[in-house]
Amino acid sequence: MAARAMLRAFAKRTLPFHSLISRSASTLVLAEHEGGSINASSVSAVAAASSLNKDNSISVLLAGLGPSLQQAAAHAASCHPAVSQVLVADSDKFTYPLAEPWAKLVHLVQQRGGYSHIIAPSGSFGKNILPRAAALLDVSPVTDVIEISEPNLFVRPIYAGNALCTVRYNGDSPCMLTIRSTSFPVPPTSADSKDNEAPISQVDLSTFGEDSIGKSRYVNQTSQNTERPDLGNARIVVTGGRGLKNAENFKMIEKLAEKLGAAVGATRAAVDAGFVPNDLQVGQTGKIVAPELYMAFGVSGAIQHLAGIRDSKVIVAVNKDADAAIFQVADYGLVGDLFEVIPELLEKLPERK
């Protein structure tokens, strides 16, 4: 009798995640959009989803209100050849990307779609929404993934990027991930991408109740009006550290960035000292960057900062301390006074056309 009871118990148990993904794989990508197009980090999330399985069906989820949402949906439909469909939740409940309504939306779409994976970029958008959605779905998310080895095997950094950890997910479906966009480059868009647009469908929100609004509310959003490239996606980044001493001196970094057509970054010490706003912070607790050229002036090279620049193609460091940790990761290093080096660079670099 005991043996039969055990057999019945095993027969009723939920299939493990790895057996489910071997049969089918479908992924929901949570996309952030602004100004009628989805962010580059969200396209990187689609690229990460495409590496899960060659037969993976990828759905991109957008939420918002009005014409800009529809423009972003059209962009999402042609942003990557792997996109199978675009799901649009058009409602005033998603006017601002608050975590509570978004998490409820993910829960609703997952119940209907039964996705094997849910992926979001590892920025403020994904980090805000995914943990809450994971709690509603009663699963544990895997965060900051930099490599997908198998559909249930992932690599993520630990100890401020000084070690890599391989994680095997054996929990219930869906497997929820945040990915570092710098580790999943986006292929160039082909000329015929418009001819291969994925279909766009509206999410039925008839069962989406008022209780989904939650306790948080949108207050305001502040951003700097600048023509400089976005820090997270720039080809060139010029960063200043505490060695610049004050906010007035930090303007030299901004002038150099303007000449190079670069984004401006800062260390945590420079941000804490009030030299620049915290949205320019580069590092483990700021923006993770992977430019073609990263220039660091007066940056000592704290562990949390190095964790945010490791994927940079070329790192150039200028510091008067020959023993600064930044030189251990720099491709080119100059021991010198930045107050002499930067003016000389500004003098010799040609003006941008």
Image (cartoon, rainbow, N blue to C red):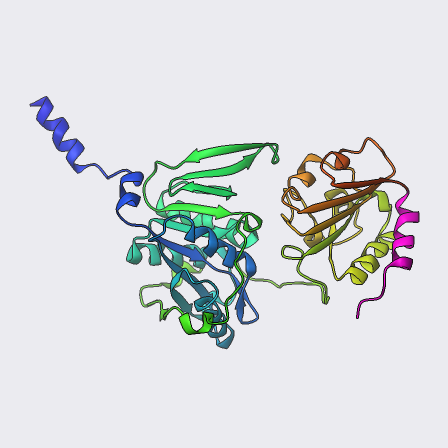
Q: Residue furthest top?
A: 2
Asked if residue 319 lies left or right of residue 165, the reply is right
Identify the residue at the far left of this view: 1
In the picture, residue 30 is in which quadrant? bottom left
Does residue 347 lie above or below 158 as drawn?
Answer: below
Q: Where is residue 268 in the image (x, y as percent from the top left)?
A: 72, 44
Q: Quick check: 179 above or below 32?
A: above
Q: Count all numbered tags in the image, as a single digit.
A: 0
Nearer to me, 7 or 219: 7
At horizontal 79% and vertical 43% (from top left) the residue drawn is 317
Magenta segment main secondary structure: helix
Whether residue 214 is visible to the viewer of this picture, yes or no, is no
* Location of residue 206 by image quarter: bottom left
Q: Give the range drawn in magenta.
A: 337-353
Task: Determine the residue positioned at 80% across, 40% down.
Answer: 333
Image quarter (top left, top right, bottom left or bottom right) of the N terminus? top left
Q: Does the magenta stretch include residue 257?
A: no
- Residue under the image location 38 percent in, 37 percent down: 169
> Is residue 115 visible from the viewing direction of this image?
yes
Expressed as whole percent of the image width and height from the top left, the position of residue 345 reads 88, 54
Residue 343 lies in the magenta-colored region: yes
Above or below, 195 against 52 in this view is below
Q: In this view, does 112 lie to the left or right of 277?
A: left
| Quadrant for the C terminus in the image | bottom right
Q: How far from the left and from the top, in percent, is residue 282? A: 68, 47
Q: Residue furthest bottom?
A: 67
For the residue pair 252 and 225, the one nearer the viewer reads as 252
Q: x, y percentage for residue 284?
A: 63, 42
